[in-house]
Image (spheres, rainbow, N blue to C red):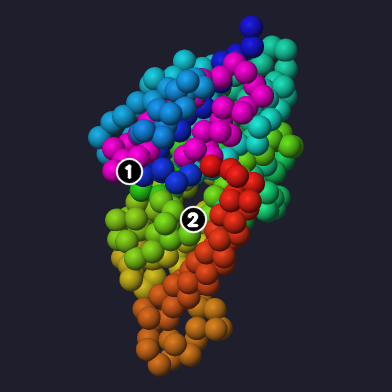
Amino acid sequence: MKPLVSILIPAYNAEEWLPYTLRSAVAQTWNRKEIIVVDDGSKDNTAAIARSFEPQGVKVFTQKNQGAAAARNTAFSLSKGGYIQWLDADDLLDHEKVEKQMQALPASPDPKMLLSGEWGRFMYRPDRTKFEPSALWCDLSKIDWLIRKLSQNVYMQTASWLISRELTLAAGPWDTRLLGDDDGEYFCRVLLASDGVRFIPGAKVHYRSSGAGSLSYIGGSDRKRDAQWLSMQLHIGYIRSLEDSERVRAACVKFLQNWMVYFYPERTDLFEQAQSVARSFGGELKVPRLSWKYHWIKAIFGWPLARRAQFSLPNLRWSMVRGWDRLLFRLEERKSGAV
């Protein structure tokens, strides 16, 4: 008998996009599947929409609001599948995503084989998804995967993975302390328990870009900065548990430098902590540089305002593009009669 795959979906105030996500899960050509939605105390119609899919085999559970990580832990505790497919409530799976990854397993599959696949970004129209390969789109050992992730500031989106239950249990639960980079930290632990990553071309995920509305968006939140710093320290500990070499230390310094733009100048305490870590690796962090477009703001109004402008103005431009894409999406839906 084919293995059962559990598609696990945490959902919070997701009424706008959950129907599309659930349709993509129901449409998976791998027919040995269960789909579990955990409504994390939503204040809108998320739970009712999810229950409307129960005739199609979707199982719905509710809990008081505890955050995405806690909802994922609940979903896994309710699942029975030999393989786990995580899926956020606004993202989409290509209809053959799970099947292509499952078919890549040998006749006697190694439960420690970690499978990844292609992912791309879209706003409202999934047919416009842009799939842009990164240095992680290939088969990699554990250490090489982590070195590329940290040094090149790249990652694999949550739903791109397919994970055996054995690996999921070995990794342990999602860390509920992390407010944004919980997926990055979690999949580091999955990776450590694995025998390495096998990349499956054609196994596609459509990742919806939501900008400042994303859980991963740090903005001016000190709580999110503190949580991000915790995640970064955990990342560094994980990679050094595999290898403590010059190339690993160099990757850690690059990793720290990449994130300093989110800490400086508002959180010089975190910058100094990161600097101390970098120096222990033989490196030195530089004060983040502003894009040339914002130097005049710094000269007149100072660093804090210039930094806010560097983040807020692109977000404003992105919001305008997103609004236009939403309008076109609604017009296409109306024309096609889709609901």
Residue 321 location in percent, x, y? 57, 67
**Residue at image mark 2:** 210
* For discs 2 and 1, the disc positioned in front in the rendered view: 1
**Residue at image mark 1:** 44
Q: Residues within 10 Å of mark 2 (few under 14, many from 20)?
A: some
Q: Is residue 278 above or below residue 171?
A: below
Q: Is residue 47 above or below residue 181?
A: above
- Quadrant containing the N terminus is top right
Dot 2 lies on which element? loop
Residue 30 or 187: which is nearer the viewer?
A: 30
User: Which numbered disc, 2 or 1, marks the residue that appears first in the sequence?
Assistant: 1
**In magenta segment, residue 23:** yes
The quadrant where residue 266 appears: bottom left
Residue 146 or 200: which is nearer the viewer?
A: 200
Residue lying at 64% horizontally and 46% vertically, measured from the top left: 336
Amino acid identity at mark 1: Asp
> Which of the numbered marks, if any, corresponds to residue 239?
none
Q: Which residues are magenta?
A: 18-46
Mark pair 2, 1: CA separation: 18 Å
Amino acid identity at mark 2: Ser
**Residue 85 shown left or right of residue 133 in the figure:** left
Residue 120 or 281: which is nearer the viewer?
A: 120
Residue lying at 43% horizontally and 86% vertically, measured from the top left: 298
Residue lying at 37% horizontally and 89% vertically, measured from the top left: 301
**Residue 318 shown left or right of residue 195 in the figure:** left
